[in-house]
Image (spheres, rainbow, N blue to C red):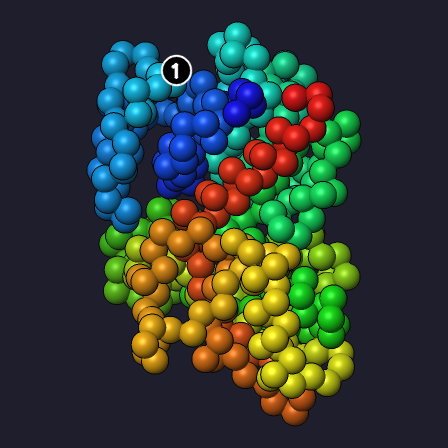
């Protein structure tokens, strides 16, 4: 691909995008020419080569003093801690020589002022981030609204969130064909790195409790992520998240009241049609294996944004719907980030 990409932040998602990119055939990969993090480069190579969740990658991993070497391809490494610099400081000035089309930020710590400064300093032409940063120009969920991207208007682009990418396609279908009066979204999400292994201080006190032995209720932005892409649903969604002691694959328990009557047959047919056509590769209808239900770990490494567990699709009084859907909250989301990069690449000015 001709797109010149840099990555800031090599946590689970930053490394996941690298991995997903190099899982592709060489001709289909994006040119990632520079990556940045606060870790020493050998730690980055070590974490990519030895992944506790996905195992060893199917490509070679090495490094030297300045470059990470994936599948024989050199990616320059810059050790930068953006948290210790203000937006006005040219802390990423060394990246200017790479003529980046897109700087992909997976730190989760930057704000809109940071991003606008990077654009003003001509570090990159576009910023793509992995959360709904307040003030971003557009939030894109691939398969639903990527056609709304306009290169001349949108410089700071959000790829939404992992749960947003899972929830938006389902809400889009339901709202388009039936209308949604109100919905409740419950995410059962694997533990994350901001939690504590043992009880300790955390700004959100419950996340300071031992993550390995508790189900921990917390807030989630999945409702906001959905409303940003589907504004007709504003003030119609409420949500809560439960962090659970698993490593990967999230499930969403979604219940909604529709605006018109329907039947299970109509819902089943509708979801199946979208999964096979308009949202092929994004949405999947799951019926189990040989008559048996699967467990969450069975969806490890799946690229779908949302996997509807069709055996648990329910409808009462013709309008009250219940849906259980799973998704690999890391790898599936990283695949959507690469899809969004493809959308940016299609625009003429980059």
Residue at the far bottom in the pictured view: 317
Q: In this view, does 270 lie to the left or right of 14?
A: right
Q: Is residue 188 left or right of residue 336?
A: left
Does residue 287 lie above or below 203 as drawn?
Answer: below
- Give how far across and how far down residue 312 sits, in percent: 47, 80
Does residue 290 lie above or below 204 as drawn?
Answer: below
Q: Quadrant of residue 289?
A: bottom left
**Which part of the image, by quadrant, shows the C terminus?**
top right
Query: Residue at (43%, 74%) from the top-left corner?
Result: 287
Residue at the far top in the pictured view: 97
In-front residue for pair 297/289? 289
User: How many badges with numbers are in the image?
Assistant: 1
- Give how far across and how far down residue 35 sits, in percent: 42, 22
Query: Which element type, helix, strand or loop, lies under badge 1?
Result: strand
In-front residue for pair 118/101? 101
Query: Residue at (52%, 30%) from the top-left corner?
Result: 104
- Give how far across and how far down residue 134 sits, in percent: 65, 41
In-front residue for pair 28/300? 28
Q: In this view, does 2 lie to the left or right of 180?
A: left
Q: Quadrant of residue 19?
A: top left
Badge 1 density bin: few <14, some 14–19, many ≥20, Cα 10 Å = many
Does residue 304 lie above or below 51 as drawn?
Answer: below
- Give how far across and how far down residue 311 sits, in percent: 45, 80
Residue 206 seen anywhere in this rendered image of the structure = no
Query: Residue at (39%, 15%) from the top-left corner?
Result: 76
In-front residue for pair 171/289? 289
Residue 348 seen anywhere in this rendered image of the structure = yes
Query: Residue at (50%, 63%) from the top-left corner?
Result: 284
Does residue 95 lie above or below 126 as drawn?
Answer: above
Q: Name the residue under label 1.
A: 76
């Amino acid at each position: 691909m001709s797109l010149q990409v840099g990555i800031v932040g090599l946590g689970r998602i930053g490394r996941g995008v690298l991995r997903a990119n190099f899982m592709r055939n060489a001709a289909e990969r994006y040119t990632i020419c520079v990556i940045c993090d606060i870790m020493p480069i050998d730690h980055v190579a070590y974490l990519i080569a030895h992944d506790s969740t996905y195992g060893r990658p199917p490509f070679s991993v090495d490094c030297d003093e300045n470059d990470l070497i994936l599948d024989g391809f050199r990616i320059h490494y810059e050790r930068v801690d953006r948290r210790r610099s203000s937006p006005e400081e040219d802390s990423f000035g060394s990246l200017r020589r790479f003529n980046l089309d897109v700087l992909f930020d997976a730190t989760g710590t930057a704000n809109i002022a940071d991003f606008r400064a990077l654009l003003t300093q001509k570090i990159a032409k576009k910023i793509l981030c992995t959360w709904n940063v307040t003030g971003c120009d557009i939030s894109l969920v691939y398969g639903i609204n990527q056609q709304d991207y306009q290169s001349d208007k949108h410089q700071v682009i959000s790829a939404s969130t992992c749960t947003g990418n899972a929830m938006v396609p389902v809400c889009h279908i339901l709202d388009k064909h039936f209308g949604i009066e109100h919905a409740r979204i419950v995410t059962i999400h694997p533990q994350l790195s901001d939690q504590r292994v043992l009880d300790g201080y955390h700004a959100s006190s419950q996340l300071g409790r031992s993550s390995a032995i508790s189900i921990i209720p917390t807030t989630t932005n999945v409702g906001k992520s959905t409303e940003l892409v589907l504004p007709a649903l504003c003030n119609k969604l409420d949500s809560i998240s439960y962090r659970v002691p698993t490593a990967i694959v999230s499930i969403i328990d979604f219940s909604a009241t529709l605006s018109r009557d329907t039947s299970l047959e109509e819902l089943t047919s509708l979801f199946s049609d979208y999964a096979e056509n308009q949202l092929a590769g994004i949405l999947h209808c799951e019926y189990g294996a040989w008559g048996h239900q699967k467990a969450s770990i069975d969806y490890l490494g799946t690229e779908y944004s949302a996997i509807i567990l069709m055996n648990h699709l329910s409808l009462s009084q013709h309008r009250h719907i219940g849906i259980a859907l799973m998704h690999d909250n890391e790898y599936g989301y990283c695949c959507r980030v690469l899809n969004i990069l493809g959308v940016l690449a299609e625009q003429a000015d980059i």
